[in-house]
Image: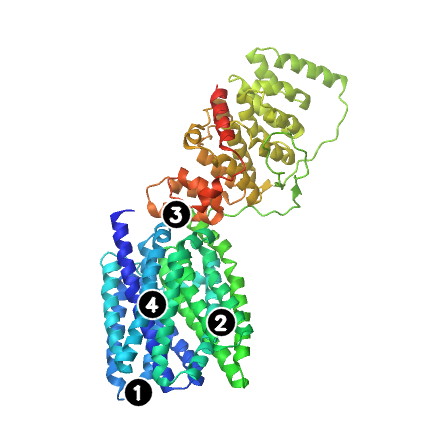
Amino acid sequence: MADGERRATWIATVTALVVVASFIAGKAARDALLLSSFGIESLPIFIAISAVFSLPIILIAGRLMARFGPARLMPVLNLLSGAAAIVEWVMLSEYPRATTIAIYFHLSTSGAVLVSGFWSIINERFDVQAAKRHIGRIGVGATLGGIAGGLIAQGTAVYLSTDKIMLVLAGLQIGCALALFVLGGARGPRPVVADDETGTWFAVGVVARSRLLRNVGIMIVLGAIAAGVLDYVFKADLAAGASKADLLSSLAAYYMVTSVLTAVIQLAICGPVIAWLGVPRSVATLPLALTAFSAFALMVPSALAAAVARGAEMVTRSSLYRAGYELLYAPLPEGDKRPTKVILDVGAERIGDLLGAQVVGILVYMLVEPRTALLIATVVIGILALAFALRLPHSYRIALEDSLMASSGDPNASSTATAASESWHALGGLPFLGHSGEPSPLPLRVLERSPRPKAVAPTLEQRQRVTAMLDELRSRNTPRIKRALTQKLTPELAIHVIPLVALDDVGRQALTALRTIAPRCTGMLVDALLDETREIKIRRRLPDVLLAGEPTLAAWGLWRGLVDPSFELRYRCGEALSRMVVAGRLAQVTPETVFEVVRRELVVDQTAWNSQQISEDRVLTAAREGKDEESGRPLEHVFTVLSLAFPPEPLRVALQELQTDDSKLRATALEYLASVLPADIRGQLWPLLDVEVEGSAPAALVGSAVVKVDDQEDHARNDEQQKP
């Protein structure tokens, strides 16, 4: 870790402590002051009004965020919030009820905006891979801040009058401003200047166009509705069991306990769980916990069960959810990220609060005993939120693909496979060829099948012509052979043309001739391709010919070639299959089948891995009209095989960006791979990319791979022996 990155991490951790301490203390003060002056029945009304009041402020904050950037804006907003707290303290003794309302609206709106702004600074300060490394430590700082905020609020309740909490909050927010200035104010990224098209409606348009942001926004709204309903149940139980004088200390103690539990989760399991689940599935833990514990509170009707359910939601939100949620925005461009993040972080939450207040209000005013109905509503809405959360992994991968394509300078390139408009033909039922260590049955689906011509008995003239052509092909006279290869061949002659592929002087003409008859002799070509007794020169040149063959049988033969001992043949077969996918002649293979082949390639030590390469082949290059620009490295072959199951263009760009010195581009490429590859393959691939393996689990999984290292090393030795 670089010294600058380490220093930034420590500053971010301390800043998180101060920011969250201020937020938790303010939250406790806000609720205690409101419940002391107004009854619990009025809480839904205040939540709804606060949500409506905060929406225009959030839109303005989003526009300012896009113009100035969070690193410059947040210190100023914290100072303004601190000044407002001082004014409210002065007015609280003279106009207690009116000032309490103002405090509630102020802290409800500013608290969420300021915390969101802090995490926006973190999101811009670190790339996605650096954020993954340090988000746990920063999260611990935030959790300690929650504990500190609870202690501050409780200490104020015990030793000072309740109104003094506003002065304490003012001091905390001034401290936040200083900490945020040190974190990013002096060296924050250059702001993205917003014009008329990059304001509020621009941000809404970005959310509407992005599948990822749409799913995130709906999940946040539904989660906020469910959390708001559950929060009402918890606070109604608390208000019924505690005196008004004890409300501040009770809430402070509760928030402090949940912060301690959050710290335990952060330190014990947060990092490994995020590495195991991935970013989007970590976000899904919030609606899952909310739904499960609300169902528990429904089955166990007690105040303690409701407190446990509310606490579980808060702990999950502040640990696994928060860490994963901040990383969700990594694929977005900076100009899109700044305004949309505020709108989703705070705006979607406020809309959820508003709708949640309506749900609470309807049930409370319609039912004499609304507690059970409220918990049922929480469970139902939580299930809906979970359904949208489970859609995040796919939309997150698409966002990463879009980010990769944008960085390549070709944003219009297609990142999806060609849609299949015809019926698919599965090849899993074809017989095996009896190879040891053979792959699973080929689940390729062919989109184009060449018609098989009806067999017709040859005439005497045709037989005589074939005999004459055969004499020419066997003549060992280069001009005669070339002349024969330019004639129209019959499938019977293919077996005699195949050996000519190995000859450098007539190899190009032989390849051209075989392509013309490939649809009628594909089986013969596949036999030659997989015949390990044949010269490697012939075998490595045949995959290009099979591209013109009958797709069903050609794809099956090329797939079998992916487990051949020769790396050159595996490389050429993978390349040919990938070209079939790109050309729209073959549907993508199932990911698990591709992973099986990739595992075979990766279970190899560094020496054997580096020794694998393809030889320069001038005949093949000439046959491709000089377009053979592949480097022939093992890593390139792995990405080619992956492109059989995933969009080829994002993988191509990811491979390019992994080889750059730009840490941000490299981090995006690694995050994309992490979103599509299982843990054991990441554990195999990361060391070959000079990336530290996250945790010990992937390394353990590597040892249980299907193919033994010795077998792969034998493949590498065979390549050395077969090179011409």
| Amino acid type shown at disc 2 | Ala
Q: Which residue is mark 4?
A: 146
CB atoms at circles 2 and 1 under 8 Å apart? no
Q: x, y (%) of residue 59?
A: 37, 70
Which amino acid, by three-letter code, is at mark 3? Answer: Ser
Q: Amino acid at mark 4?
A: Gly
Q: Residues within 10 Å of mark 2 (few under 14, many from 20)?
A: many
At which x and y percent is residue 528? 61, 24
Instruction: Classify mark 3: helix, strand or loop.
Output: helix
Q: Which residue is mark 2?
A: 226
Seen from the viewer's position, the closer of residues 351 and 263 is 263
Q: State the residue in front, 587 or 330.
A: 330
* Alpha carbon distance from label 3 to label 2: 39 Å
| Quarter residue 596 falls in | top right
List the residue tagged with mark 3.
407
Tell me which corner region of the image, top left, top right, bottom left or bottom right, holds residue 240: bottom left
Question: Residue 96 got which mark?
Answer: 1
The mark lying in front, picked from 1 and 3, is: 1
Q: Is residue 224 above or below residue 120?
A: below
Alpha carbon distance from label 1 to label 4: 27 Å
Q: Are marks 4 and 2 in contact (CB under 8 Å)?
A: no
Counting residues from the start of the chain, the first of labels 4 and 3 encountered is 4
How far across and how far down the image is residue 88, in percent? 27, 81
Q: Which amino acid type is shown beneath numbered disc 1?
A: Pro
Q: Residue furthest bottom?
A: 94
Helix, strand or loop at disc 1? helix
Element at label 2: helix
